[in-house]
Amino acid sequence: MAQTLRQKPDEAVRSAKPTIELATQDKAKLTARLEPGTLEGLVEDHALLGETHSGATASRVQRKAATLEQNEVAARTQVRVQTVRDVCKRTGVKAEILKAVGVGHKMTAGKVSTVVAGADLLIAAYQKYPDAFRGAGVLPEDIDTITGLRNALRAADAGQETQKVTAKDKTVARKAVQARVEAAIDKIIAAA
Protein backbone atom coordinates (compact mmCIF):
# COMPACT_ATOMS: atom_id res chain seq x y z
CA MET A 1 0.00 0.00 0.00
CA ALA A 2 1.30 3.44 -0.93
CA GLN A 3 2.27 5.85 1.81
CA THR A 4 -0.01 8.86 2.15
CA LEU A 5 1.89 12.06 1.52
CA ARG A 6 1.34 14.83 4.04
CA GLN A 7 2.63 17.72 1.97
CA LYS A 8 2.55 19.09 -1.52
CA PRO A 9 5.80 18.52 -3.41
CA ASP A 10 6.94 22.14 -3.14
CA GLU A 11 6.22 22.11 0.61
CA ALA A 12 8.28 18.94 1.01
CA VAL A 13 11.19 20.58 -0.84
CA ARG A 14 10.96 23.67 1.40
CA SER A 15 10.63 21.71 4.66
CA ALA A 16 13.54 19.42 3.84
CA LYS A 17 16.00 22.26 3.40
CA PRO A 18 16.12 23.47 7.04
CA THR A 19 16.07 19.86 8.26
CA ILE A 20 19.12 19.11 6.12
CA GLU A 21 20.90 22.24 7.34
CA LEU A 22 20.26 21.49 11.02
CA ALA A 23 21.04 17.79 10.68
CA THR A 24 24.29 18.60 8.88
CA GLN A 25 25.31 20.93 11.73
CA ASP A 26 24.50 18.27 14.35
CA LYS A 27 25.61 15.30 12.27
CA ALA A 28 27.98 14.00 14.93
CA LYS A 29 25.18 13.88 17.53
CA LEU A 30 22.60 12.37 15.15
CA THR A 31 24.77 9.71 13.49
CA ALA A 32 24.41 7.26 16.36
CA ARG A 33 20.63 7.66 16.44
CA LEU A 34 19.99 7.38 12.69
CA GLU A 35 20.19 4.48 10.30
CA PRO A 36 23.32 4.71 8.14
CA GLY A 37 22.74 6.81 5.03
CA THR A 38 19.58 8.56 6.27
CA LEU A 39 20.99 12.09 6.03
CA GLU A 40 22.84 11.41 2.78
CA GLY A 41 19.71 9.86 1.31
CA LEU A 42 17.68 12.90 2.34
CA VAL A 43 20.16 15.23 0.65
CA GLU A 44 20.03 13.21 -2.59
CA ASP A 45 16.25 12.80 -2.52
CA HIS A 46 15.77 16.50 -1.74
CA ALA A 47 17.68 17.44 -4.88
CA LEU A 48 15.82 14.82 -6.90
CA LEU A 49 12.44 15.97 -5.59
CA GLY A 50 13.25 19.55 -6.57
CA GLU A 51 14.09 18.39 -10.10
CA THR A 52 11.02 16.18 -10.48
CA HIS A 53 8.73 18.89 -9.12
CA SER A 54 9.97 21.44 -11.64
CA GLY A 55 9.84 18.76 -14.33
CA ALA A 56 6.16 18.18 -13.56
CA THR A 57 5.35 21.71 -14.69
CA ALA A 58 7.19 21.18 -17.96
CA SER A 59 5.45 17.84 -18.42
CA ARG A 60 2.07 19.47 -17.89
CA VAL A 61 2.87 22.10 -20.54
CA GLN A 62 3.99 19.39 -23.00
CA ARG A 63 0.85 17.36 -22.34
CA LYS A 64 -1.36 20.39 -22.97
CA ALA A 65 0.55 21.21 -26.16
CA ALA A 66 0.11 17.64 -27.40
CA THR A 67 -3.62 17.81 -26.67
CA LEU A 68 -3.93 21.15 -28.48
CA GLU A 69 -2.10 19.73 -31.51
CA GLN A 70 -4.35 16.66 -31.50
CA ASN A 71 -7.49 18.80 -31.27
CA GLU A 72 -6.33 21.09 -34.09
CA VAL A 73 -5.55 18.20 -36.44
CA ALA A 74 -8.85 16.50 -35.52
CA ALA A 75 -10.79 19.67 -36.31
CA ARG A 76 -9.05 20.11 -39.69
CA THR A 77 -9.61 16.46 -40.57
CA GLN A 78 -13.26 16.61 -39.57
CA VAL A 79 -13.85 19.72 -41.71
CA ARG A 80 -12.23 18.10 -44.77
CA VAL A 81 -14.14 14.83 -44.39
CA GLN A 82 -17.43 16.64 -43.76
CA THR A 83 -16.85 18.85 -46.79
CA VAL A 84 -16.44 15.82 -49.07
CA ARG A 85 -19.52 14.22 -47.52
CA ASP A 86 -21.50 17.39 -48.16
CA VAL A 87 -20.27 17.58 -51.75
CA CYS A 88 -21.38 13.99 -52.33
CA LYS A 89 -24.83 14.72 -50.90
CA ARG A 90 -25.31 17.94 -52.91
CA THR A 91 -24.25 16.41 -56.22
CA GLY A 92 -26.73 13.55 -56.00
CA VAL A 93 -24.38 10.64 -55.41
CA LYS A 94 -26.24 7.32 -54.99
CA ALA A 95 -27.47 6.39 -51.50
CA GLU A 96 -25.23 3.30 -51.47
CA ILE A 97 -22.16 5.49 -51.97
CA LEU A 98 -23.36 8.04 -49.42
CA LYS A 99 -23.63 5.25 -46.88
CA ALA A 100 -20.13 4.04 -47.78
CA VAL A 101 -18.81 7.60 -47.37
CA GLY A 102 -20.20 7.67 -43.85
CA VAL A 103 -23.07 10.11 -44.31
CA GLY A 104 -25.17 9.72 -41.19
CA HIS A 105 -22.24 8.70 -39.00
CA LYS A 106 -21.50 11.43 -36.48
CA MET A 107 -18.01 12.86 -36.22
CA THR A 108 -16.95 14.89 -33.21
CA ALA A 109 -13.66 16.76 -33.42
CA GLY A 110 -13.11 16.17 -29.69
CA LYS A 111 -13.34 12.41 -30.16
CA VAL A 112 -10.43 11.26 -32.30
CA SER A 113 -11.83 7.79 -32.99
CA THR A 114 -14.92 9.21 -34.71
CA VAL A 115 -12.86 11.47 -36.96
CA VAL A 116 -10.42 8.68 -37.88
CA ALA A 117 -13.33 6.33 -38.57
CA GLY A 118 -14.98 8.98 -40.77
CA ALA A 119 -11.76 9.49 -42.73
CA ASP A 120 -11.28 5.72 -43.09
CA LEU A 121 -14.81 5.30 -44.46
CA LEU A 122 -14.28 8.12 -46.93
CA ILE A 123 -10.93 6.79 -48.14
CA ALA A 124 -12.31 3.25 -48.54
CA ALA A 125 -15.36 4.57 -50.40
CA TYR A 126 -13.15 6.57 -52.75
CA GLN A 127 -11.10 3.48 -53.55
CA LYS A 128 -14.28 1.54 -54.27
CA TYR A 129 -16.17 4.26 -56.22
CA PRO A 130 -13.56 6.60 -57.74
CA ASP A 131 -15.74 7.53 -60.74
CA ALA A 132 -18.62 8.65 -58.54
CA PHE A 133 -16.28 10.87 -56.54
CA ARG A 134 -14.72 12.36 -59.65
CA GLY A 135 -18.21 13.01 -60.99
CA ALA A 136 -18.98 14.89 -57.78
CA GLY A 137 -15.83 16.99 -58.20
CA VAL A 138 -13.73 15.24 -55.57
CA LEU A 139 -10.18 14.97 -56.81
CA PRO A 140 -7.50 12.43 -55.87
CA GLU A 141 -5.61 15.33 -54.26
CA ASP A 142 -8.55 15.88 -51.90
CA ILE A 143 -8.38 12.25 -50.78
CA ASP A 144 -4.59 12.46 -50.47
CA THR A 145 -5.02 15.50 -48.21
CA ILE A 146 -7.56 13.65 -46.06
CA THR A 147 -5.27 10.61 -45.91
CA GLY A 148 -2.39 12.82 -44.76
CA LEU A 149 -4.57 14.50 -42.16
CA ARG A 150 -5.83 11.15 -40.89
CA ASN A 151 -2.24 9.89 -40.54
CA ALA A 152 -1.24 13.12 -38.79
CA LEU A 153 -4.21 12.73 -36.45
CA ARG A 154 -3.21 9.18 -35.59
CA ALA A 155 0.34 10.36 -34.88
CA ALA A 156 -0.88 13.29 -32.78
CA ASP A 157 -3.18 10.99 -30.83
CA ALA A 158 -0.35 8.54 -30.19
CA GLY A 159 1.90 11.42 -29.09
CA GLN A 160 -0.74 12.73 -26.72
CA GLU A 161 -1.31 9.28 -25.22
CA THR A 162 2.46 8.88 -24.75
CA GLN A 163 2.53 12.22 -22.91
CA LYS A 164 -0.24 11.02 -20.58
CA VAL A 165 1.57 7.77 -19.77
CA THR A 166 4.86 9.59 -19.29
CA ALA A 167 3.20 12.05 -16.92
CA LYS A 168 1.71 9.22 -14.86
CA ASP A 169 5.09 7.50 -14.61
CA LYS A 170 6.74 10.74 -13.51
CA THR A 171 4.05 11.27 -10.88
CA VAL A 172 4.62 7.80 -9.44
CA ALA A 173 8.38 8.41 -9.29
CA ARG A 174 7.95 11.87 -7.72
CA LYS A 175 5.61 10.50 -5.06
CA ALA A 176 8.08 7.74 -4.19
CA VAL A 177 10.89 10.30 -3.75
CA GLN A 178 8.63 12.57 -1.72
CA ALA A 179 7.65 9.67 0.56
CA ARG A 180 11.35 8.96 1.20
CA VAL A 181 11.98 12.66 1.94
CA GLU A 182 9.09 12.83 4.40
CA ALA A 183 10.18 9.58 6.08
CA ALA A 184 13.78 10.80 6.41
CA ILE A 185 12.62 14.11 7.88
CA ASP A 186 10.52 12.21 10.44
CA LYS A 187 13.48 10.02 11.41
CA ILE A 188 15.81 13.01 11.80
CA ILE A 189 13.28 14.94 13.87
CA ALA A 190 12.66 11.90 16.07
CA ALA A 191 16.41 11.39 16.54
CA ALA A 192 16.94 15.03 17.44
Image (tube, rainbow, N blue to C red):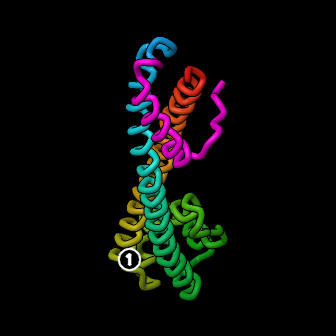
Q: Could you tell me residue 2's position as x and y percent?
A: 63, 28
User: How many residues crowd mark 1 within 10 Å: few (<14), some (14–19), many (20+)?
Assistant: some
- Asked if residue 157 can be seen in this view, the reply is no
The three-letter amino acid code for the residue at tag 1 is Asp
- Asked if residue 75 can be seen in this view, the reply is yes
Q: Could you tell me residue 139's position as x and y percent?
A: 37, 79
**Name of the residue lying farthest toward the bottom:** 90
Residue indicated by mark 1:
142
Left or right: 80 in relation to 89? left
The answer to which of 12 and 164 lies nearer the viewer is: 12
The answer to which of 184 and 148 lies nearer the viewer is: 184
Residue at the (47%, 77%) spot, across then down:
80
Q: Could you tell me residue 87's position as x and y percent?
A: 52, 84
Vertical side of 126 occupied by 38: above or below: above
Residue at the (54%, 45%) spot, across then down:
9
Residue at the (40%, 32%) spot, across then down:
43
Q: Quadrant of the C terminus?
A: top right
Left or right: 50 in relation to 103? left
Look at the image and say whether residue 15 sits in the magenta stretch.
Answer: yes
Residue at the (44%, 53%) spot, across then down:
59
The answer to which of 75 and 81 lies nearer the viewer is: 75
Look at the image and say whether residue 80 sits in the magenta stretch.
Answer: no
Q: Which residues are magenta?
A: 1-30
Q: Main secondary structure of the magenta part?
A: helix
Q: Could you tell me residue 172's position as x and y percent?
A: 53, 36
Vertical side of 33 occupied by 76: above or below: below
Quadrant of residue 47 within the rendered picture: top left
Q: Quadrant of the N terminus?
A: top right
Task: Report helix, strand or loop for mark 1.
Answer: helix
